[in-house]
Image (cartoon, rainbow, N blue to C red):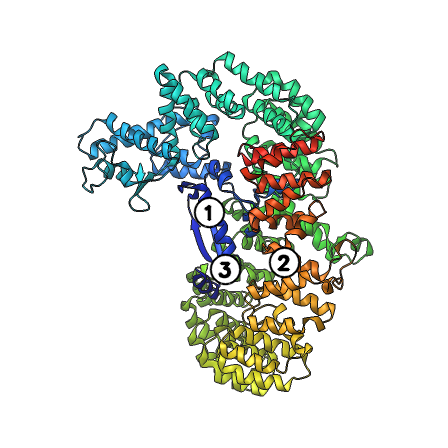
Amino acid sequence: LKAVCDLAKSNGFPFLVIIDAVNENRDLNMVRAALIQLLTAYRRESLFLILTCRDNSWQYLNDLMYNQFYLEVYPFQKKRAMGLSGFEEGVLQLGHYNESEFREARQLYFARSNLQVLLNTDAEKMLHLPLLLRIFSDVHRDTKLAYTKSLVSADLWSAYQKQKTSEVYAAINQSLRQSVIVRTIEQIAELMFERNTPILDLADLQSIPNLNPDSDSDDSLLVQLKNASIFLEDPPETIRFVHEPFAEFILGRILAKRIDQASSRDAALENVAALVHGTRWNYVLIHIASQTTHPEYFLNRLRNENLWWAAKALIAIGEKAPSDVHSQIINDLITQLNSRYTLDKQRAVDSLGRIRASDAMPLIRDFWISTRDRVALRSLALLGDTSIAKEFVLYIGHDARFLWPEQEGLVGLLQPSFKRGAIEEAYKMLNNPTTASEAATALGYLQDIEAVGPLHNYLVEVNYDDASALIALLRIGTSEALAELESAMVELGQQLERNNNDESQESASSLNGGHPKAFWTLEELRVYGFQYSSLDRVSPILTTLLNNPNFYIRYEAINALQMLGAVNTAPLLIQSSSLATNEFSTSSAINQALDSFGSRLDIQPLLDMAHDTDTPDTVMPFVIHALGASRNKKAYPILSQFIQESRFLVETIHALGNLGQREALDVLIPLLQRATFPGHSTENIHHSVVTALGKIQHPSAFEALSRQYNHSGVFFDLESLVAVGRELAIPTLRTAWEEHQTDRFYQEHIIQMLLWINTPAAKNALFELLEPLDSQKAIALVQAISRGRGLLAITGVVFEGVIDDDFVDMIDERLDQFSPDDQSTTVWALRSSDTLRVTNLLTRIASESSFEVDIPGTTGENARTIKQEALRILAERGSLVALDFVLDSIGNPNAIFFERSLAKMERPAVLEGLCNRLPTSEEKKLVRILELLGWLGNQSVLKKIRDFLTDSRLSIANAAYEAEQRILNIAD
């Protein structure tokens, strides 16, 4: 796998590993351990791992360790102020479509299925789940349905089963009754449930009548069940359901029928208990709830096993629930409001809100008033309590960038009367400067199409200086709202132009960070508005703004299109350059966008523009740049023509370098032999050619570059020579080293080049240059490593890679003679390599008192020693050497940033260390240790945690209780 990672990295990409439906593995604990091992073993490699997992299984697969490897923080999961409760950053919730995604998906599915139907709002909510939308479309293919008020998941799966059973019945020539086919499907589902696995070996199916798993003939029932896409044989010789939720529906129906029959009820209720305490099939409980005709038995058993599951089941059963059982569950939940533990109170409040227990509203309101807990606020909103409308607006309007997952689900469930009340409250809050931004944001999230006018008035009042209101217009998304947004952006752009034309000191006083406030308002709109919008929604307005004469407006539009990856807008970006004459920032932004689009660029429109004689000279340089960025060999013929012209000589040279084609050497190398270039500096042209040849990295250019470097002696010419010749350039590097004995900077870069070549010959050459080793040479080696790997002007540099053990030995030999500044640089350089030898050196630094020296430049709260920095790196790598360092820091400010490294360390040692500190820690630190035990612990630490359940200090008892519940997988 490492070789594949290296190969991918050499081509500029990570090695992509996709594990789809990871929850469908037989053993979730084994999968979790395997993922941890994979991430640990390859944590320094160019590896990009994508997992998909059903949400009901993620809690059993998740591990705090994953947080250490997230490539980026997705907008749907925020870092929470309460420490590790927000460690899910990097997890993208894909469970439901948002409104715009649903509209687009619905149109596509219904068109493909030739389905015509008018859906009620409640029915639409059900179909926001992508799988159910797909099943609904397939089941009702080629039909025209009447107005549909509501949908029930069980009814949809029942219709799906009938359709699939009919397909199989026809495929086996009606040789078996449809009831037999259904019973066979049920038997397979039951067998999976009994063995607690979503996948069975074909050999396991031998006992099921009529299935004949060994047969490949078309009349085999199993073959036709697979052909109907009910089951899938993947991997070979195994069987699983194509849709795991369908298996859950089947199991729910089986158990519901058994509960309804007195003779089988007790055994079925024992199965219910197993489901409550199991780790895989929990959602079957919801299907039982929606299908049983005797919910009282089911609900009463759930009450005894787990009140929180009883509440979820009660929501699924709805009006069918017997009134006495309904009241009992609500009373049980109300009783939990008096629990000693905050977690139980929160769960009770949340459940009462979702059940719509209006009689409990006064108690929930009291809980809200006393705690200001947002769980209570959400429940009161669901119950329609308009007294909290203002607090609700502040709650969902807190972050203009995105709704949290729990907020997004909440908005869709609000009663119309409460939603209207919240909107009216937001209108009032727009008139208060202290709440106006939150109110504007809330109006955007509530999709109030009537808010355009009030938002316009507010923007005029604040001189358009509130990005929250602009983003709200973007979210409302009507033509009127987008037109208002465009007008507001134009007004901000005009303000900036007026500011540029005003040289008075009054204007200068409005600057913020070097730019007027209006500039930052536009930046915030781009980064937190356009970036988090669908391209289809914002592309029309952004492409329109490309033609705006205002520099600032075009600059924001260009950057937004780049961030959204709008590669199809490349021709429009290029055409907008006609307005960018003498605008360095805009021109640079266009080129950066084209570079980011790279090989995704459609070559044909670019060729058309290049051949079009009407393309303005101001635009053609950007066409040429795009041709090079495309790396498409079809661009070479036209570029080879352009290089014959003086007009676009520099641009074409750069484009040919970026294009990377061998043929370009035929037109580039002769330019090095020319002495003059009308209208251009010969030195600049030669430098551009040398850089282009270096980027192409073809050995045929070595001789020409060697002559050029011998003539110029320029450092960047040497870089290109190394890029092209690699080992062939080593003699030249030796000579350059001798010629620059007193130039430490030059020698450090020669070391960097030899490290980039990274062959045995280069390593030997570097050894010879560093001998005899002294402190200055050792420091030069450290400085070269700390600058990163790569050739600055050719490949760029990256701060990762292996440091050869022999070089580490050299550094280790002289490290004690370094100044504190150079020792600090050494630790920084070692951060990029994760070899055993590097770890051993860091361990030495972390163990010896001589390194308890402050890092130069760190003072006050940021002061730290060289030893502490080594310990931080070791902690990041999961080394047990740093365990005590991390444990001792628990409870300190900013400790959370390396507390999480505990997840990388050997778990038994971590748990032992945490438990050993339980008796001696003061209250704040003890709470934190209990929280960590909840996230990292297992059954082995439950006894020690439970010792604190009755602690007189409520914060400690709460932390212990939540840790226990989390280990038992019942905290959520």
The amino acid pointed to by label 2 is Ile
Question: Depth check: 701 or 840 in front?
Answer: 840
Query: Which SS class for mark 3?
Result: loop
- Which residue is found at the position 47% from the left and 28% from the top? 276
- State the residue position of label 1: 51
- State the residue position of label 2: 873
Question: Depth check: 75 or 849 in front?
Answer: 849
Q: Earlier in the sequence, mark 2 or mark 3?
A: 3
Nearest to viewer (mark 2 / mark 1): 2
- Dot 3: few (<14), some (14–19), or many (≥20) neighbours within 10 Å? many
Q: Earlier in the sequence, mark 2 or mark 1?
A: 1
- State the residue position of label 3: 46
Would residue 194 appear left or right of 955 to someone viewing this image?
left
Q: Earlier in the sequence, mark 3 or mark 1?
A: 3
Q: Is residue 248 above or below residue 936?
A: above
- Which residue is found at the position 56% from the left and 24% from the top? 351
Query: Which SS class for mark 2?
Result: helix
CA distance separating discs 2 and 1: 27 Å
Query: Which SS class for mark 1?
Result: strand
CA distance separating discs 2 and 3: 19 Å
Residue 653 location (% of width, % of height): 51, 74
